[in-house]
Image (spheres, rainbow, N blue to C red):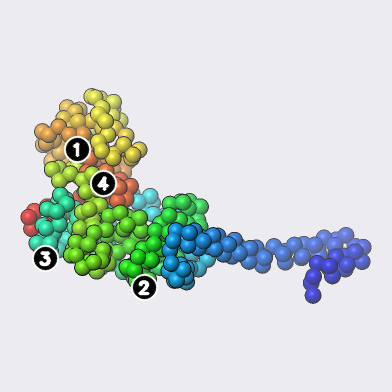
Amino acid sequence: MNSPRFIMTNLQATPSRPLVYALLAMILGCFHSQPLHAQSDAAFESWLAELREEALALGVKAETVELAFSEITPPVQRIVNNDRSQPETVQTYDDYLSRRVSEWKIINGRERMSSYEPLLGEVSRAYGVQPRFILAIWGMETNFGTFPIRESAFNVLATLSYDRRRADFFRSQFLAAVEMLDSGFPAYEDMKSSWAGAMGQPQFIPTSYRRYAVDFDQDGRRDIWNSEADVFASIANYFKQNGWSDDHTWGRPVQLPSTEERLLLDLGGENVAAPGRCSRYRSLPVWKDLQTWQALGVRAADGSNLPTRSIPAALVFGDDGDGQAYVVYSNFCVLMSYNPALKYALSVGLLSDYYWGAAQ
Ligand SMILES: [Ca+2]
């Protein structure tokens, strides 16, 4: 009825300019509101079709692709919002650390240190990772496997791939998830993830699953959803492959000589090269020998001298003015490879200290 031709004819027959403008505004408004929505859906559908082609081009079975794409909805704003307001960015150190290094997590971790002692010991010997760090990751990621993970991994990863912030990264994660499904394990129903696309009790993104997941109980499945043996070994293998060394710890809380001197600390003494993979983290720019920090006045949290070992160490500070500071070692960068936020790695390290000696 409102075909463009009818309207044009009508306009031509109408000499009044205000009326013409009013009608034009109506028409434009009409074209503007509804079709825009349809346009964005159409853009998503065409993007999705390309993604489907890419999955097929990888050699994934057609029925797997059908299944993987079966429940994908247009981008979910809630997922995008979560991605842009991660707690590591929006919470202070004090807030973040107190929520994660909680009494519940300390007590429950110690209990599990005791109940899983033989298995943790076995995994620890196989991979060279102290049990307390495996427990701390397990606690941080999913409250020791008790936190419900409910999102559809495919839907989450499609939304984050369509969003421009880290499109390439999440597109490769989406395709890796399709390949996981194609491999026959896990089942489609079990491919649930967090809002960030991480799966199972250790919260592995699909490429981490492909690279690091381990079938420690040797039942033929790398089951990071239901097998504690596979969960522990997969975390430990992740650490080992990223350069973990069990001859030292993550770091420790320290006292600084004085708040005023804090800015001068980086300038004193000799710097050393960032160890292992630490050079990739710009949030840890200055490394010195632990003994250099000692000479500059840095002390253990109780005021005693730092350990006498000579190893590379960097300083991490808490919130401005809260007086909290830490020295961290190369293992800290392995914790950061799990999640690159300083606050995250600190939480894992501090939590692991509470499990120290719990059953060892
Ligand atoms: Ca298994």
- Between the residue at mark 3 and the residue at mark 4, the CA separation in whole angstroms equals 28 Å
Relative placement, left or right, of 235 versus 36 is: left
Q: Amino acid at mark 2?
A: Glu
Residue that badge 4 annotates: 242
Q: Where 189 sits versus 199, above or below?
A: below
Q: Which secondary structure, mark 3?
A: helix
Identify the residue under disc 2: 189
**Foreground tag (2 vs 3):** 2
3 or 4: tag closer to the N-terminus: 3
Q: Quadrant of residue 111?
A: bottom left
The label number, if any, that marks residue 115 in the structure image: 3
Tell me how far mark 2 sits from mark 4, CA to CA. 31 Å
The type of residue carrying mark 3 is Ser
Query: Going 15% across and 57% down the picture, which residue do you hit?
Result: 123
Q: Earlier in the sequence, mark 3 or mark 1?
A: 3
Report which quarter residue 28 is drawn in.
Answer: bottom right
Classify mark 1: helix, strand or loop.
Answer: strand
The reply, left or right, for residue 35 in relation to residue 307 is: right
Q: Residue furthest bottom?
A: 1
Mark toward the start of the polypeptide (1 vs 4): 4
Which residue is depicted at the point 10% across and 57% down? 121
Q: Is mark 1 within 8 Å of ligand 1?
A: no
- Can you tell which of label 3 and label 4 is closer to the viewer? 4
Q: Residue furthest left?
A: 360
Counting other residues with Cα less than 10 Å from the Cα at mark 4, is it few (<14), some (14-19), or many (20 or more)?
Answer: some
